[in-house]
Amino acid sequence: MKRSTIFLLLATFLMVGCSESDLGGSEQNSLLGKAVNFDASISDAFVTRATYYHDGSFNEGDHLTIFRQEAVSGSTTQFSSDTEISRVYSLQGEYASTVNLGTSWKVLTGATGTYADKSSFVQTAADSLVWENGSTVRFRAWGRSNLANVLNNSKTNKASFYPDYTLSDWITVSGPTETIPMKLLHLACRIGFAPKSGNELAGIELCTEASDYVDDTEEGGLTAEEKAKAVEDAYHTMCMPAGVNMSNGTLYGLTQNHYTNTSDFSTIESSSVISSAAENGLVPFGLLSADEIVNLVEHPQFMAVDGRRYMISIPYLMDNGTDQGSYIHLPAYTRFRVRLKDVNNGDKAATTNTEGSYHILTIGEVENNGTKVFADGIDLMPGYSYLFTVGYKYGKFTMSVNESLSWTEQDAVAAETASADGSIATAKYDWWKQALFDAYTNLKNGKTSSYLPEFKIGSAEEFLEFIHLVNGTAATYTSGLTLNGEPEEIPEPNATWTKDDETDEEGNAVTVTEKDAPGYVFYWHYQPASSTTAAKFYRSYLTGPYSFYEKNLNTKPHFKITLTADIDLQDVEIPAIGNSAAHPFEGIFDGAGHTLKNVYVNGGCLFGYVKGAAISNLKIESNHTTSLLNTATADKEHAVYIAGVSVNAPTTHAIAHTVTGLGYVVGCVHEGTASGALVGTASNLYMYGCMETGSGLTSGTGALLGGYASGSTAFFAPLSSLTWGRFMCNYYDTQRSTGVNAVGTSSVTYLPQQYIRGAHSHVLKAKVDNLLSGDVNYNSLTSRQKEEMYGLAPWKAMNYAIYKYNTSVIGQSYPCNMQYNAGASLIYDNRYPQLSSGAPNSATYSASSYNVLLQNN
């Protein structure tokens, strides 16, 4: 297909009067771009995002406009431009994957409507939102996402304007009805820059100066001037979008004067369409010449949003020349000037916080896994994103690209490859040594009655050291030294060891001190009292994994590891904690509500093997495939306790692949893509207040539990009476993964009071209760009504389950100190409940109104 024909086909497919079946199917999709990703989460690298919450929908200030047309009077199928009746509605700040003609939808006052005789009128707030029974009505929508909240506050700061436009297919339905599905399709194209972890962007500029380019004439190429001119010419054809032409599905640009002089950006798309170059307003396709486009039309700029920089462009030539409708092409030698903020006060420009120097990114030189991604340059296409990440990593300026270019294909984000020397340094295990020393000092001074170190981790370096201690890789050498004499307590000024494999010239063993034994890790070891010896605290060295467990002391509880801050692991590949069955993690790991960011674990599981351990109050965010743990096994004295964990990442089984023996999974949620259930297999599991919202689960498989371990009795079954069971208040999304079950291949229906629910996305995101009145029989409802009548809002029901667990004997020993937070007061904002610090309030959830067993549905 020739590029010059693309615009004509686009216009043909989207002419008014086309029904959905007329749109050309996959051909139309390929021209228009991809649908809005309503299910996107923060783990997705580059999506259409909301003003406040990074969830991919239109909400919190984003704007959607709906056009309604009624069919010719007396006809049930035909629409006629001569007699159709039209109305215009708008929605701002609500859930928008469906059109709901309720009170939140408002007639767009001042917009033009038409009567059946084709006469027009100006709409007022009194105009009707509904239509008569039996009418056939067609809907079409267009929307604008603006992350900077311009639409709500009418800011004049153009640096935050983000014109991300979409258009829907026509949807034809017979009335009356309340909800109509909408599929919004992107029209614009965007180029984006995101800073690497630890960096901040100060500015991005497209290079159009010859000084930024290299002369390649000796290699048969172009001069620097020719390159700069070609890039500048391409840029001058790029226009900032400012509206949608509903008659042919194209984007309007806007004049430079209109952009400069407009202060209220909430109404910029409703400005007058110009008819000549002398006017100010919206610019349609085919009106102006190429020279007029260059000089009169506003060209896109890099806007600052959420730390990133976006440039949104109409992706076609829109002048009145012969190439009208052709894709705009940026050649491979196109360069961008990248300016970073100075974060160490070491290279600051004289008057700004920007580094004194800048960096150059050349499109054709950007590689991913050794391959030049844009060796032939970039064609700007509707519905596509071109995202570059830039910044310093391991002391070197690097750049990479996200190859998932459409706005819905965000699940296969390529991992950013670290430098060959990329690693996380160590801090010499000071946090660990200090905890051991303080525990003994407190015991000796009578401040505590038992020896119980408090291990606190607050940096990526310390976190990696924790992994090395568990895995037995902290020391280079773990044998070969013999302590001279008996162990002595602090201060032990003269402790020495003998090197077992070295002798001097006379054959005597060589004695060394700690500082002369490189490769060993020395620490203060506590030896508890026995029937024959007193307790001792003496210098020793690691001879293998350090067990964060009480078995060495024969006391309870376990040793406890606590995070003291959010930790950014910077996409550096790390080993799993307990990366072999021989060296599992045994202990308590408390995230204290903190987040591990940019996690990249070899094997995809943060914890490899755990035994009789507790993991709680932790949030995980990553673009890499990440699960909390691989295999968890209960021991004779301790079950496995997992409480208050959120995983926001692509995953296999978000919480655990396998739980063997008695286990508790409480208050855990996953958001992202998933190839398996929240827990893969289990043999004796209790699950309370959990949610799986993952997309990608196979129809007919389990969302909460993949299946029972071999030889175990089915324990995930409906209750026969209203009693508190072992699986309560758990939810899974039936829209992101259709056809899934609660457990494995079983499509068992659970009692409503169990709250084991497969529900629609918007139900799981609901902020308020949806209770039936006391005289309604739940069993008399249709299946669709049952899906919508969920009783307590999910976040409340899950919090109630956490409360019930925390008040149990087990929960008091291993509590969940996280609770679900529904966020804003809006009923729908397209955001799943989020885990936040703090256990559910006992005073609130002890009330009978929150008891799920008392709910009538």
Image: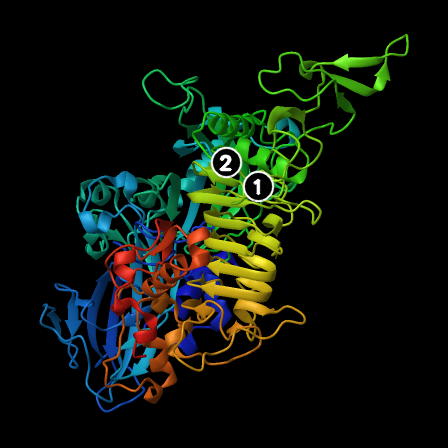
Q: Which residue is mark 2?
A: 450
Residue 294: percent from left, percent from top: 34, 41
The residue shown at (34%, 69%) is 763
Indicate which disc residue 416 carries. 1
Q: Nearer the viewer, residue 237 or 195?
A: 195
Q: Nearer the viewer, residue 439 or 237?
A: 439
- Looking at the rendered structure, the kind of residue marked 1 is Glu
Q: Quadrant of residue 637?
A: bottom right
Q: Residues within 10 Å of mark 1 (few under 14, many from 20)?
A: some
Q: Colour mode?
A: rainbow
Q: Is residue 193 left or right of residue 91?
A: right
Q: Earlier in the sequence, mark 2 or mark 1?
A: 1
Indicate which disc residue 287 carries. none
Residue 409: percent from left, percent from top: 51, 57
**Badge 2 element:** loop
Residue 47: percent from left, percent from top: 42, 53
In the rendered image, the vertical position of residue 189 relative to residue 804, given as above or below: above
In the rendered image, the vertical position of residue 376 relative to residue 325, given as above or below: above
Q: Quadrant of residue 680?
A: bottom right
- Image quarter in which the N terminus is found: bottom right
Residue 639: percent from left, percent from top: 56, 56
Q: Is residue 129 left or right of residue 633?
A: left
Name the outermost residue toward the bottom. 74
Q: Is residue 390 left or right of residue 117?
A: right
**Badge 1 element:** loop
- Image quarter in which the C terminus is found: bottom left
In the rendered image, the vertical position of residue 706 relative to residue 477, given as above or below: below
- Looking at the rendered structure, the kind of residue marked 2 is Ser
| Labels in figure, total | 2
Tell me, yes or no, if residue 19 can be seen here.
no
The residue shown at (36%, 50%) is 836
Q: Nearer the viewer, residue 536 or 789?
A: 536
